[in-house]
Image (cartoon, rainbow, N blue to C red):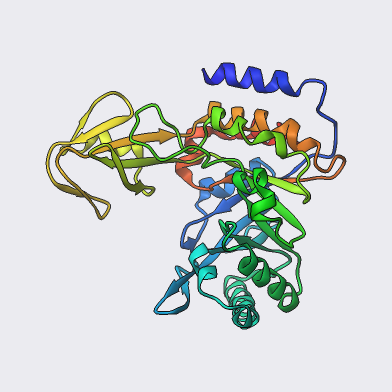
């Protein structure tokens, strides 16, 4: 099925792809300690990766105020020749509470914290990316925050763009930033259905493609290379076990395999701090090389029409030994080459 999707996506792009400069190559880094293993450093070198989009901290809402959550710490040097682009993830809840008068102060404090954290980690800031799933109800507050941040910061701003924000832009608006990164994943619905996929689902993705080419911002793209485990109970999704390696599940004595990607808890137990009740189901969703290449083949022709002749950035989410092992540098090289 995935092979068929790749062929269909490639066929759809034939004759429409315009040759342009090679794309910049990047990874997202989403762990709370910025330290690259030897395998990760080798992959960066072998794949000629130029940028790492590094999540610095989250902004959330706690105790009636904006709170800084999970700031990243550093335990290793910045790779030579690699630009670090800081990313601030902002919970949409923040913009349900802030008043317009509060936005400049919050933006100024955010920029100060970005500079402080970057100095601690040992890199200079040349771009700042904001990651927020804003909606119709929070767009004005988020956009006001962006404008205030542009006044405070001395660097270009970019923003992640979700598929629904592309398709329904008349409602959600277009953020006042220099560039967007289209997140070409998380497109399905959370479901206990064994066949449902959330990370990359070609049928769901097809519903959004028509409006990519005329999006009024230059678009980069982020593609998935990760896996996760969906925790369900009584046919409802309880949560995600994102730190769980699917390869470890077969060896756990409190899980019973029902196929290659489904496990049932045989008794109450904890898994990485998550309580499993007897009868709970763990459903593995793995994004392997075939899925990532299908995603690249599907989105590539539509991106080519947005800013022809201009280099864009392809960013893979996310950098980890587990994901690198699953895909391999040869397969990731093909992904990077698939989009211009």
Residue 105 screen position, x and y as percent: 62, 83
Residue 330 in view, yes or no? no
Residue 153 in view, yes or no? yes
| Residue 142 figure quarter | bottom right
Nearest to the observer: residue 185 or residue 83? 185
Pick the quarter of the image with the C terminus.
top right
Q: Is residue 323 left or right of residue 163?
A: left
Please determine whether, in this image, residue 254 is positioned above or below residue 216: above
Residue 265 screen position, x and y as percent: 18, 38
Say which residue appears at 13% left-offset and 46% top-offset: 268
Please determine whether, in this image, residue 314 is positioned above or below residue 192: below
Please determine whether, in this image, residue 10 is positioned above or below residue 152: above
Residue 303 screen position, x and y as percent: 75, 38
| Residue 309 figure quarter | top right
Please determine whether, in this image, residue 45 is positioned above or below residue 125: above
Residue placed furthest toward the right: 309
């Amino acid at each position: 099925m995935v092979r068929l999707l790749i062929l269909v996506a490639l066929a759809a792009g034939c004759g429409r792809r315009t040759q342009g400069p090679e794309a910049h190559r990047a990874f997202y880094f989403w762990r709370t300690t910025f330290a690259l293993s030897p395998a990760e450093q080798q992959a960066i070198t072998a794949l000629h990766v130029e940028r790492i989009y590094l999540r610095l901290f989250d902004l959330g809402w706690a105790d009636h105020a904006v709170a800084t959550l999970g700031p990243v710490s550093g335990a290793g040097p910045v790779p030579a020749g690699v630009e670090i682009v800081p990313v601030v993830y902002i919970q949409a809840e923040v913009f349900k509470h802030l008043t317009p008068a509060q936005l400049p102060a919050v933006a100024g404090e955010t920029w100060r914290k970005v500079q402080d954290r970057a100095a601690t980690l040992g890199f200079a800031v040349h771009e700042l990316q904001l990651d927020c799933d804003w909606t119709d109800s929070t767009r004005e507050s988020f956009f006001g925050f962006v404008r205030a941040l542009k006044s405070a910061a001395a660097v270009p701003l970019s923003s992640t763009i979700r598929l629904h924000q592309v398709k329904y832009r008349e409602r959600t608006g277009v953020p006042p930033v220099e560039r967007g990164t289209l997140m070409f994943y998380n497109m399905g619905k959370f479901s206990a259905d064994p066949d449902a996929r959330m990370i990359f689902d070609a049928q769901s993705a097809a519903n959004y493609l028509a409006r990519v080419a005329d999006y009024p911002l230059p678009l980069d793209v982020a593609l998935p290379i990760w896996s996760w485990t969906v925790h369900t109970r009584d046919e409802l999704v309880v949560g995600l076990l994102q730190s769980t390696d699917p390869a470890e599940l077969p060896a756990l004595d409190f899980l019973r395999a029902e196929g290659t990607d489904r496990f049932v808890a045989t008794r109450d137990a904890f898994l990485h701090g998550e309580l499993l009740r007897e009868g709970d189901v763990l459903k593995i969703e793995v994004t392997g090389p075939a899925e990532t290449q299908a995603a690249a083949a599907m989105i590539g022709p539509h991106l080519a029409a947005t800013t022809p002749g201009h280099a864009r950035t392809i960013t893979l989410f996310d950098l980890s030994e587990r994901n690198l092992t699953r895909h391999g540098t040869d397969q990731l090289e093909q992904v990077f080459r698939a989009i211009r």
